[in-house]
Amino acid sequence: MPQKFFQYTTAKILLILLISSAILALCIDYGLPGHLSVDSLVQLYEGANGKSISFNPPLMSILLGGLLKIDLDPSISFVVIVSLFYALAAALVLSQSTSLVRIVLAAVLLCNPIIILYSGNVWKDVLMAHAVALSAGLIFFSQGKRFKHQIIIATALLLLSTLIVGSRQQGLLFALLGSIAFSLTLSTSRPKRAIIAAVLFLSAIFLNSLITSDFENNKTISGSKVGLTIAIRYDLAGMLANGADIDFPNPTMSKELSGDAQDYSARRVDTLRGPARQIWGSSLGELSKIWFKAIKDNPSAYFNHRISHFKWVMGLEEVKRCLPHYFGVSDYFHGGVQLNLTQELGLQERVGLDYSKHKSLAKKIIDTTLYQHWFYLSVLSFLTIAFAFMRQWPAMTLALAGTGFSLSFLFVSIACDFRYVYSSLVLCSVLSTYFTLKVWRRNEATTC
């Protein structure tokens, strides 16, 4: 019996290593040497020079700058890091089954070709998504472990949660529910779990603030003000385009927003040409009052606008018009600093090169449900309910985080770029794998 058990355990470990290594190899093969869009170049420039020229959260820029400081190629290193994150997540989640057959079947769900393609994109969305995946893997691995091992896992989760919080504002949702999910794996009282979850979540916020404080102090642009102003302007234009009657404080603002309504597209905010001097010259407090009153007086126009846009985000319209993928290196001149960032960073444009392998894979799946976020939202919603019935509380909490993240774009999104909801796609693959490993197995409820 011990010999059989040893042989079985060895076979399981070797199988998981083989699968996770294959995933790692695929991600790196399709990812290298890294794809740099305009956003990637901006954040790489910020990291290299230690100053902000955008309203992006600064942690990604700091990470890329740190890689440069230790003489590592930032794009190649980024690809290796995020690929390793996902491969480790795959190994950890697959380790939750004792069935070799289930492991093989579940592994198919981890090999979403979009994840393989996206591992090469040097984007904060990819960093957050793969950090979320590894966090989920660690949370599953934490179940049933000794407290001293769970302390090590908690430390790793703190670092990952810091990356998640610092990548996107909505990362707070993943960090919060991820902390709660981890606390549900602990064999202790509910009050202690609540304290541990709160400490883990707040520590991630504090650590991110500590790392980014110098960078934030040197910012000449308030990211929150810019982002909120753009979102309010888009909503006001969308409501006007849907027949709203909005009482603006002065005729000039009314005229400017009426012009925006003519340019409005439910697809993205970029079509608003302006001018918008009154909007940008107003304080957030003033704009918020106009926005709240407009929604209160015109709820149907607001929801028509938001639902029309959400359909684009979820892939219910034309996915090909929502930047479904990006290959190469952009050639970008930044008007704010009057520099060609590609040349300044010592890079060469690669957009025109032949990425036949990447394009061939993307072409095969672009018209399938794999490229439609409504599909992943539906699966995550199902998994939230299914895990609740299975009493898999940490998994249910993570599925709820993915569902909430996707649904948040109903209210906050300003463009339908596919990458914005990429984190839900990656988490969906991990949770679907876990579900396949655990469904129809008795007596595996987790503590609550």
Image (cartoon, grey):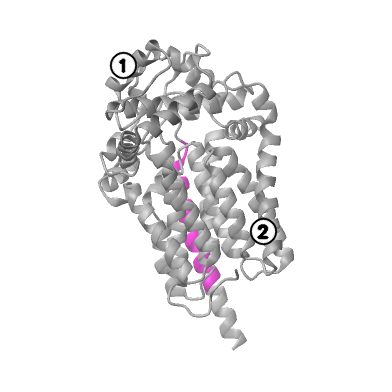
The mark nearer the N terminus, 2 or 1, is 2
User: In which quadrant will I find the C terminus?
Assistant: bottom right
| Number of the label disc, if any, that sits on residue 313 | none
Query: In the rendered image, is residue 80 in sight?
Result: no
Asked if disc 2 and disc 1 are in contact, CB closer than 8 Å, the reply is: no
Q: Position of residue 333 (x, y in %)?
A: 45, 16
Q: Nearer the viewer, residue 131 or 206?
A: 206
Task: Please identify the quarter of the rendering in which residue 413 is found.
Answer: top left
Q: Secondary structure at mark 2?
A: helix
Query: In the rendered image, is residue 444 in sight?
Result: yes
Q: Is 369 left, or right, of 26 in this rendering?
A: left
Q: Secondary structure at mark 1?
A: helix
Q: Amino acid at mark 1?
A: Gly
User: In which quadrant will I find the N terminus?
Assistant: bottom right
Q: Which residue is mark 1?
A: 259
Find the residue positioned furthest to the right: 148
Label 2, residues with CA under 10 Å away: few <14, some 14-19, many ≥20: some
Q: Position of residue 190 (x, y in %)?
A: 67, 65
Q: Position of residue 122 (x, y in %)?
A: 49, 36
Q: Nearer the viewer, residue 439 or 337?
A: 439
Q: Is 17 left, or right, of 306 in this rendering?
A: right
Read off the magenta span: 12-34
Q: Which residue is mark 2?
A: 194
Relative to 231, say whether 175 is above or below.
Answer: below
What secondary structure is the magenta-colored segment mainly?
Answer: helix
Residue at x 47% of width, y 53% of height: 427
